[in-house]
Image: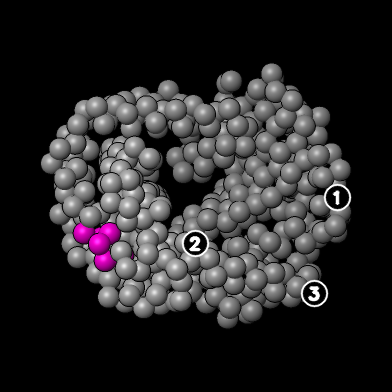
Amino acid sequence: MTVKITTLDNGLRIVAEQRLNLETASIGVWVNVGARNEDKTVNGITHCLEHMFFKGTENRSARDIAFEIEAVGGHLNAYTTRDNTTYYARVLKDDVPLAVDLLSDILLNSTFDEQELEREKDVILQELGQAIDTPDDIVFDHLQAAAFSEQALGRSILGTTDTIRSFRSDILRQYMRENYITSNMVVSVVGNFDHDALIELVARKFENAPTGVSKQAVSAKYTGGRITEARTLEQIHLTLGWKGCAFEHDDYYPMQIYSTVLGGGMSSRLFQEIREKRGLAYSVYSFTGSHKETGIFGIYAGTSPELASQVIPVIKNEMAMIADNFSEDEIKIAAAQLKAGLMMALESTTSRMEQLGRQVLLFDRIISTEEMISNVEAVSLKSVKAIATSLANSDNISLAAVGDEQVQSLKAA
């Protein structure tokens, strides 16, 4: 399973890992543009553009795109994050040329028909409405907005009703010309394929891809804040956030260990204390979110209105306790969980394709599984306790909650 990185003459990078024992392959095109690259006036344009790439090209209608991939039993999809956008396909090994052709066609030859755009804006507005109607989904958007107040990194990936309605084909084309350039893109392939044939195929299909100098997103800074939304619901969906760390920060792996011990599973301290011992919540867990220059550490709990006020003190108490009595055994268990997750991801061509594409975009190199495991194993008790102490003592806590009117009285500090 040798990984090779090839840079074409036009600057497009290809990262490929052959697995000749498989019958399938996953192919993805990673673009280093996400919601955080948007001005406020066009919030949601990255996501809208992602949708429009599937709505017809100079060579294929939207129906053709769907039928061609499904006619061979393949899967074609895309997703937008705050940091990047990914277009990917999974096919049988003999259909790799079709997948590359489809991906190159939608990314280089889409027409952005105005009538299709008007229809798709209605679809996106329905997607936005669905997200808003899902409290345990929208609460994380609120937390991001509170933690990175008045910044692109804090804005919704989907955009707003007003911005979505404002998009026109010429605006999409201009945004695409600025961001969908070879220096901003990585093709990631994992599975059964001929390597030399793949490189030749990608070089030919992406030969006319636009080139240029990519623009850097505005640097973000954790601010902390509070957003609550009162609704008539059976539960209160509560999130707390603290300043986290960037991908390349020294604290990245210690924070993964800390989060796993505190709220990473059924054996975690928060689950045992809040759900098993006290019965205060059905769902409770911690999470980390890292970006190029910053990050967030967070905790989610879904609880009843009458119990919500008890949950926050218990969370903070567990964080204070873990800062005082973190153990070597807990680090070993958490490290085993993280290493198992890394190894299990290797068995999925799609997960591995995503991992490789993300690494080349972020670091311009491959971080081997051995290196990641070594980094996990190198985490010391001292480094984790330092993070635990810092978070437990921090007063700059973000809070976001959705639920009945009691959410308005919830306080993080």
Q: Position of residue 389 (x, y in %)?
A: 16, 47
Q: What residue lies at 49% left-to-right and 54% top-to-bottom? A: 83
Q: Dot 2 surroundings within 10 Å: few (below 14), some, or many (20 or more)?
A: some
Which residue has dot 2 on it? Answer: 137
Residue 141 shows up from this direction: no
Which residue has dot 3 on it? Answer: 115
Q: Nearer the viewer, residue 170 or 137?
A: 137
Q: Residue furthest left?
A: 324
Q: Is residue 278 left or right of residue 40?
A: left
Q: Amino acid at mark 2?
A: Asp
N-terminal-most mark, 1 or 2:
1
Q: CA distance from mark 3 to mark 1?
A: 21 Å
Q: Identify the colour scheme used.
A: one colour
Q: Amino acid at mark 3?
A: Gln
Which residue has dot 1 on it? Answer: 67
Q: Dot 1 surroundings within 10 Å: few (below 14), some, or many (20 or more)?
A: few
Q: Nearer the viewer, mark 3 or mark 1?
A: 1
Q: Amino acid at mark 1?
A: Phe
Q: Position of residue 155 (x, y in %)?
A: 46, 68
